Amino acid sequence: MSYEKEKQVAIDAAIAAAKLCQQVRQAIPAAMEKTDKSPVTVADYGSQALICKAIGDMFGDDPIVAEEDAADLSTSEMAPQLAKVTDYVKELVPEATPEAVKSWIDRGNGEVAPRYWTLDPIDGTKGFLRQDQYAVALALVESGQVKVGVLACPAMPLENGECGILYVAVRGEGAFMAPLAGGDLQPIRVADIGDAANLRFVESVESGHGDQSRQSAVAKAVGITADSLRMDSQAKYGAVASGQAVLYLRLPSPKSPNYREKIWDHAAGTIVVEEAGGRITDMHGKPLDFSIGAKFANNQGVVVSNGTIHEKVLEALA
């Protein structure tokens, strides 16, 4: 089955959402991370509205499982926020109204089905606030398997010094990247373990998002001696897929050992890495199960590798 239409709709929607997020982020004061997070809310809602509208218009029968809900925008206290969201959306969709924006956001209240989309309108909120890494992450899932994945990473650096990378993958067709500002998609591959310069691993900036001491120990056990690359969001998947690192570990924090990851935090990234030649499982070697619900109820932790070191990583974890 061809997913060309789904891929193009996803690309266009993610690029539009990334433009909105960048416009919002330009207005964030330096101290915003410690005080009012309203711009994040505006960007989250605006991004979700744009993408859910695009998916709903073209694939109206497909449910969308997304992070945000418009209920909070329906109160009188939130009217100014709704107005801001609408203004940003109108720059890309001129016919947008407050009521339409809320209805588009709530298209993301769908449930996991035999075919569905999953969306994180801003993955890496703290990175977004501190002018660091974040991603717009959109994926199509069929029969529990991710079929299409798009990651728009506005802060990821290009070789020419500019920022903004689009990662795209379709099952069975390989993984690609292109400048977010425009350009041809170029194939990407994971790094070979023999390339010593790429013996790096990536992990979350936030210590609460994993078990950093254990992650470091596992990396060393498989021969990675360099300090980790720490970045927010599914940009980490892009780093592995494009050969900047050979491993991404997200192990449960000791403070919340029973935590289960959410599907929208991983779906788009997983197919990009897999189609680039990598491998992804949970910390026990089980494939990630996208068929159950919004959380990986049957999986614990996430291990993302270039493939060749994966079994060694699982052995070290065991």
Image (cartoon, helix red, strand yellow):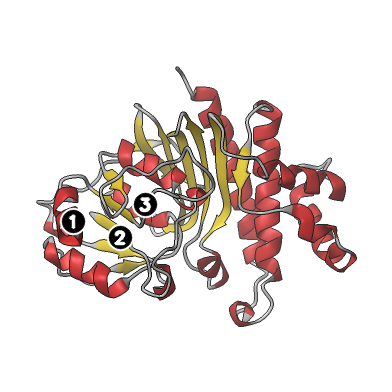
- Relative image position of residue 188 (x, y in whole percent): 30, 40
Q: Nearer the viewer, residue 284 or 125?
A: 284
- Relative image position of residue 155 (x, y in whole percent): 48, 60
Q: State the separation of the CA atoms marked 1 and 3.
A: 17 Å
What kind of residue is marked 2? Leu
* Contact check, label 2 and label 3, Cβ < 8 Å: no
Splitting the image into 4 quarters, where does residue 201 fall?
bottom left
Instruction: Name the disc covering residue 249, or none.
Output: 2
* Contact check, label 1 and label 2, Cβ < 8 Å: yes
What kind of residue is marked 3? Tyr
Mark 3 neighbour density, 10 Å: few (under 14) some (14–19) many (20 or more): many
| Label 1 residue SS | helix
Which residue carries the number 1 mark? 313
Residue found at x 22% / y 47%? 306
- Relative image position of residue 234 (x, y in whole percent): 43, 54
Which residue carries the number 3 mark? 237
| Label 3 residue SS | helix
Mark in front: 1 vs 3: 1
What kind of residue is marked 1? Val
| Label 2 residue SS | strand
